[in-house]
Image (cartoon, rainbow, N blue to C red):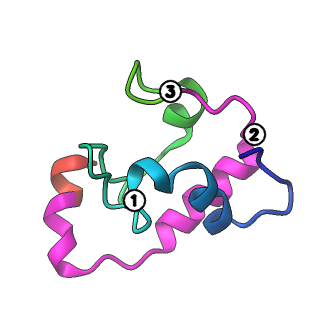
Amino acid sequence: LCPSATATGAELFAGNCSSCHGTAALGGTNGQPPVRCSRSIADAVTSGRGSDMPPFALMASPEIARVQTFLDGIRLAPRDAPRCRSGA
């Protein structure tokens, strides 16, 4: 999905991240890590993570910031906190 200057963080996450990291950002079914509790996704988005995650070169800093704001705003259920600590 090509990022849009008008897309919200939730829309950007849904179109670019949720297929691997899950719709709730708690990790994918194939072992992809949770990103719901990540303090900063910018490096991973711009540089990728080896063969596990390609870089998203078309996503500019403003779009990355909107995704980060979306992730920061998701309320974490107490049952999910251990997953974040182990995978973030």
Q: Report helix, strand or loop for mark 2.
A: loop
Mark 3 or mark 2: name the one nearer the start of the chain: 3
Position of residue 81 relative to residue 47, above or below, is below
Q: At 71% across and 46% down in the image, what residue appears?
A: 1
Q: Nearer the viewer, mark 1 or mark 2?
A: 1
Q: At 83% across and 53% down in the image, what residue appears?
A: 4
Mark 1 or mark 3: name the one nearer the start of the chain: 1
Residue 74 found in image quarter:
bottom left
60 lies left or right of 65: right
Question: Principal SS element in the magenta part?
Answer: helix
Can you give x and y, in whole percent of width and height, for residue 24 in the image?
40, 68
Which residue matches tag 2? 60
Is label 3 in contact with label 2 (beta carbons under 8 Å)? no
Q: Nearer the viewer, residue 10 or 86?
A: 10
What amino acid is labelled 3 in the image?
A: Gly
Can you give x and y, in whole percent of width and height, for residue 21 in the image?
40, 52
Q: At 30% across and 46% down in the image, what residue appears?
A: 33
Q: Magenta stretch containing residue 62, yes or no?
A: yes
**Which numbered marker is on residue 82?**
none
What is the C-alpha distance between the residues marked 3 and 2? Answer: 14 Å
Mark 1 or mark 2: name the one nearer the start of the chain: 1
What is the C-alpha distance between the residues marked 1 and 3? Answer: 17 Å
Which residue matches tag 3? 48
What amino acid is labelled 1 in the image?
A: Gly
What amino acid is labelled 2 in the image?
A: Ala
Q: Nearer the viewer, residue 6 or 72?
A: 6
Q: At 15% across and 50% down in the image, what residue appears?
A: 86
Q: Crowding near pointer 3: few (<14 within 10 Å), some, many (20+)?
A: some
Is label 1 in contact with label 3 (beta carbons under 8 Å)? no
Q: Report helix, strand or loop for mark 3.
A: loop
Which residue matches tag 1? 22
Where are the magenta residues, as a range?
54-83
